[in-house]
Image: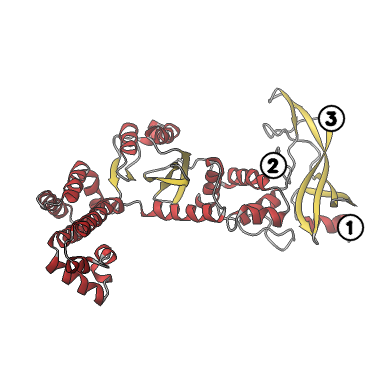
Amino acid sequence: MRLTSLLRQLIGLEATIVVGVEFDSTGLVVDVRPSYRIPRCSGCDRKVWGSYDRRRRRWRHLDMAGMTLHLRYDIRRVVCRHCHGVRVETVPWADVGSWFTRPFEDQVGYLAQRCDKRTVSDQMRIAWTTVGDIIQRVVDRYGRADALDGLTLIGVDELSYRRHHEYVTVVVDHVRGEVIWARRGKNADTLKAFFDELGPERAAKLEAVTIDMSAAYIKAVTEASPGAQVIFDRFHVQRLAHDALDQVRRAEMRAADTADDKRAMKGTRWALQKNPWNLSQLECEKLTLLQRTNRPIYRAYLLKEALAACLDRRQLHVANQKLHEWLTWAARSRLPQFIRVARTVRKHFDGILAYVNSRLSNARVEGLNGKVRTITRRSFGFHSADSLIAMIRLCCAGIHLAPVFAYPNRPTKPL
C-alpha cells in the first residue's frame, strides 16, 4: 500500500485525497485536496468555475502516534456571482472559518460534555479560549435547526451563575426534556425576548407554561401567550409553607421563657420539614412532645402537611374545595406567617389549581438546572453568560456526542 493511501485511511476523512506528507517542527503535516475538482462557494455552496487565487492554510486534525497532525492545502478563493464577491471554497474536512477539522472539534465537544475546559485544553493541546469557540461551532452543527418549533408545553426558570445576583433565564421543552432557549437576565424583558423569537403564531399554540410565582414571568407569559395555561410549580408553592413553618419555629424559640420549652423545640427543625413517612422513631417522639408543649408550631406543621395533601388530590373539584378550606384555616390560624402564605395562594389560586389537573411542574427544569450547576462547579464558575449558555446548549439541548476515532473501522461522526 502506498504511503498516501495509508495516510488517507488513517486520517479517516471523507472526500479527501492525500497528496503528500512531511515532518516539521510542529509534528506531522499532510498535504490534502478535495476529491472533487470544481470548487464550491462557501456562501451558497454552489459550484464555481475557475478560481480567483490560492492561499496556503493549515487545519489541526486528531493527533497521530502522540504527534500533532496538521492538514495543509492551498485553498482557492472564487468569485461567486450569486454572493456578489470573492469567497473561499468549502473543504470537506472543516467548516468555513475554522482552523480545526470536524473530527477534532467533535472530540473537543465530547470531552467538554464530560470534563472541565482546562482538562480539554491540556489533553487536546489548544488554548482555553479556543475550547469555547469550538463548542459554539459544535452546537451550531449538531443542534436543532429550529429548537422553538412545535412547542406546546414549556417550563421557565432562572439560574444563578455568579455572585451579586447575576442570572440566566432557561426555557425547557417538557415534551423533549431539553433546554431550548437561554438568555442572560431574569426580568420580564428577558422572557419577552423568547416570545419575540417564538413569534405570535407559535406562541398561540402553547398549551401550558410552568413557572414559579415571579411577577415578571407572569407578566411576560400572559401578555405574549394569553391562551396558554399558567401553571405554578408545586415545589415553589409548598416551599412557601415550609418557609412559614420554619419562621414560626424560630419565633417560638426566641419567645420561649423556660428551659423545658426550649428543650422541647430543640432538634425539631428537620423533623418538621420531613414527610411523615420519612420520620424516624426519635423524630416521631419529638413531634409528639411538641404537640403537647407548643401548639403554634404544631398547628403550623399541620398546615404545611394539609397544603401538601390538597396538592396530592387527583380530582379537580375535590382539590378546589379542599384548597378553599385550607385558605380559610390558614387565614384564621393566628399565625402571621401562614396568613401571608394564604394571601399568596389566594392570589395565584387558578395557577396552583391547574397543577392538580395537569400534574405538570418545574421538576424537569429544576433537574436540568441541577445539571447546569454541576457544569458550573466543574468549570470553577463562568465569567460571562455567553460561555455558560454555550455549555448549556452543548450538554442540555439533546446533543449526544461519542468519542471520535481516526481509524476506518470506527465511527468518525457523533452518533
> Badge 1 is on which residue?
3
Q: Is residue 379 left or right of residue 328?
A: right
Where the N terminus falls, by quadrant? Answer: bottom right
Query: Residue 154 sits in which quadrant?
Result: top left
Q: Is residue 6 left or right of residue 291?
A: right
Residue at the spot x=32%, y=52% of the render?
Answer: 361
Q: CA distance from mark 1 to mark 2?
A: 27 Å
Dot 1 lies on which element? helix
Q: Amino acid at mark 1?
A: Leu
Q: Which mark is residue 53?
A: 3
Residue at the spot x=72%, y=33% of the render?
Answer: 41
Type of colouring: secondary structure
- Mark 1 neighbour density, 10 Å: few (under 14) some (14–19) many (20 or more): few
> Badge 2 is on which residue?
95
Q: Amino acid at mark 3?
A: Asp
Tally of numbered discs:
3
Return the disc, 2 or 3, that comes first in the chain's sequence: 3
Query: Residue 190 sits in which quadrant?
Result: top left
- Mark 3 neighbour density, 10 Å: few (under 14) some (14–19) many (20 or more): few
Q: Is residue 350 left or right of residue 172?
A: left
Q: Nearer the viewer, residue 288 or 200?
A: 288
Residue 106, horizontal then vertical, whole percent = 65, 52
Q: CA distance from mark 2 to mark 3?
A: 20 Å
